[in-house]
Amino acid sequence: MENLNAPASKDCVLLAGPCGGRAAANPTVAFAAGKNASIVFQKNLNHWTAGSPGMFEITYNVAGDKDVTVLKTIPDTNSPSLTLYVEEVVIPNRISTHSVIGVQYITKNPNAPAVFYQCADVRVEEHP
């Protein structure tokens, strides 16, 4: 990935669900099942509109499973491009060697793409 801190970075314009058309990767990050986790993401480009504000969704699913759980919904505000968000979620209490944490920016802006997608391949492990 390149230029993530530049507005309209090509690596942030991922429009095909569920993961922007990117192939799955081997998980290198682990979360503890049933515990809190901080999810950090960036609003690369501001698509907020007063008449129809959008939202961000943080989602979870076991890789290959079509059942997706929404962990948190965050209303979009008129925050500037490149704003960083740090959101607390509870990781589902389901052990998995390959799960997916996704963040979707649902713009609800008729002059912008409907949804931007980003994903991270993760493991969910038993908490000691």
Image (tube, grey):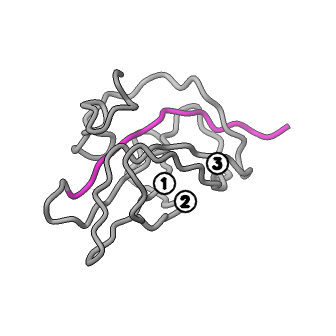
**Between 126 and 109, the one nearer to me in the picture:** 109
The amino acid marked with disc number 3 is Arg
Q: CA distance from mark 2 to mark 1?
A: 5 Å
Q: Earlier in the sequence, mark 2 or mark 3?
A: 2
Q: Secondary structure at mark 3?
A: loop
Q: Give the mark count.
A: 3
Q: Secondary structure at mark 1?
A: strand
Q: CA distance from mark 3 to mark 1?
A: 17 Å
Q: Are marks 3 and 1 in contact (CB under 8 Å)?
A: no
Q: Which mark is residue 71?
A: 2
Q: Earlier in the sequence, mark 3 or mark 1?
A: 1
**Between 83 and 18, the one nearer to me in the picture:** 83
Q: Residue at x 44, y 55 (%)?
A: 68
Describe residue 31's horizontal placement relative to residue 60 as left or right.
Answer: right
> Where is the C terminus found, in terms of image quarters?
top right
Query: Which residue, given by chain and number where applicable, does mark 3 sit on?
Result: 94
Describe residue 38's horizontal placement relative to residue 106 as left or right.
Answer: right
Q: Is residue 27 above or below residue 85?
A: above
Query: Which residue, given by chain and number where applicable, does mark 1 sit on?
Result: 58
The residue segment tinted magenta is 114-128
Q: Are marks 2 and 1 in contact (CB under 8 Å)?
A: yes
Q: Is residue 86 above or below residue 126?
A: below
Q: Residue at x 47, y 35 (%)?
A: 120
Crowd tier of the residue under label 1, counting other residues whose Cα lies within 10 Å: few below 14, some 14–19, many 20 or above: many
Q: Earlier in the sequence, mark 2 or mark 1?
A: 1
The amino acid marked with disc number 1 is Ile
The main secondary structure of the magenta stretch is strand
Crowd tier of the residue under label 3, counting other residues whose Cα lies within 10 Å: few below 14, some 14–19, many 20 or above: some
Q: Position of residue 39 (x, y in %)?
A: 58, 45
Crowd tier of the residue under label 2, counting other residues whose Cα lies within 10 Å: few below 14, some 14–19, many 20 or above: some
